[in-house]
Amino acid sequence: MAIDQKAIREHIRGLLIAIGDDPEREGLKDTPDRVARMYAEVFEGMNYTNHEIAQMFGKTFTFEGDTEDLVVVKDINVFSYCEHHMALMYDMKVTVAYLPKGKVIGLSKIARIAEMAAKRLQLQERIGRDIADIIMEVTESEDVAVLISGSHSCMTARGIKNADAKTYTQTLRGRFKTDGALLARVKA
C-alpha cells in the first residue's frame, strides 16, 4: 500500500481551513505538499509488513558459538507517531538483544529494522513487539529482548503536559522472560 500524497495534500489544505487559517497565504502555500512528502518519509514503514522488513534487512552471517554469546545493540535512536493522537513519540532509545542460534545479523540491520518498525502509526509497546518479531524471523532465535524508552508529545505537550515523563517498555521472548540474570546483562 503506497502512501497517497495527493490525498494528504488535499486533507492538509482542508485542515488548515478547519483551524481557521488561509492555505493561500504566503507561509502556507506549499505546506500541504511539504507535509505530504514528510508523511511519505516518516510513515514509510506502513508500506511493509514485518515479514517484508525481515526480508529487506535479513542479511545474516554464520556464527559458531553457544547460546550464551549475547548480542546487544543499545541506544538506537528512533521516533514514531502515536496512533491515538498522531502525536510525535521522540527521544526514543531502543535496545535490542538476542542469543544467536547459528547465525547473526549485521549490526546496522538491527538499527534499520528498529527504524522501519517505528515508521508507522504506532504504540510504543507494538514497536517493541514488531522489532522482536522481525529479529526472531531473521536470526531464527527465540531469545530476543527489546527495551524502549521514549517521550510522547501526547503527554508532554498536551493533556497533562508533563514534560519530564518517559515511557519504558520491555518485550521479552524466550529465555529473557525467565532468566533474570540474562536480562540483567542487557540492562548493564
Image (spheres, helix red, strand yellow):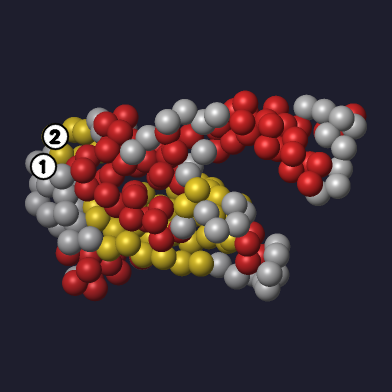
Q: Are marks 2 and 1 in contact (CB under 8 Å)?
A: yes
- What residue type is disc 1 on? Gly
- Which corner quadrant of the image does residue 82 belong to? bottom right
Return the residue at label 1: 102
Can residue 75 be seen here? The reply is: no
Viewer-proximal residue, 23 or 147?
23
On the question of residue 19 being in view, the answer is yes
Judge left or right: residue 107 versus residue 26: left
Name the kind of residue labelled 2 in the image.
Thr
Q: Position of residue 145 (x, y in %)?
A: 29, 58
Q: Residue at x 15, y 45 (%)?
A: 140
- Please tell me which residue lies in front, 93 or 156: 156
The correct choice, above or below, for 26 with respect to 186 in the image is above
Q: Look at 41% across and 61% down and name the residue there.
A: 125
Which residue shows up at 71% across the image and 38% down it? Answer: 12
Residue corresponding to mark 2? 62
Looking at the rendered structure, the number of numbered marks drawn on it comes to 2
Q: Is residue 152 left or right of residue 10?
A: left
Horizontal and vertical percent for residue 51? 27, 38
Local crowd at mark 1 within 10 Å, few (<14), some, or many (≥20)? some
Q: Secondary structure at mark 1?
A: loop
Question: Looking at the image, is 70 positioned above or below residue 56?
Answer: below
> Mark 2: few, some, or many residues within 10 Å (few <14, many ≥20)?
few
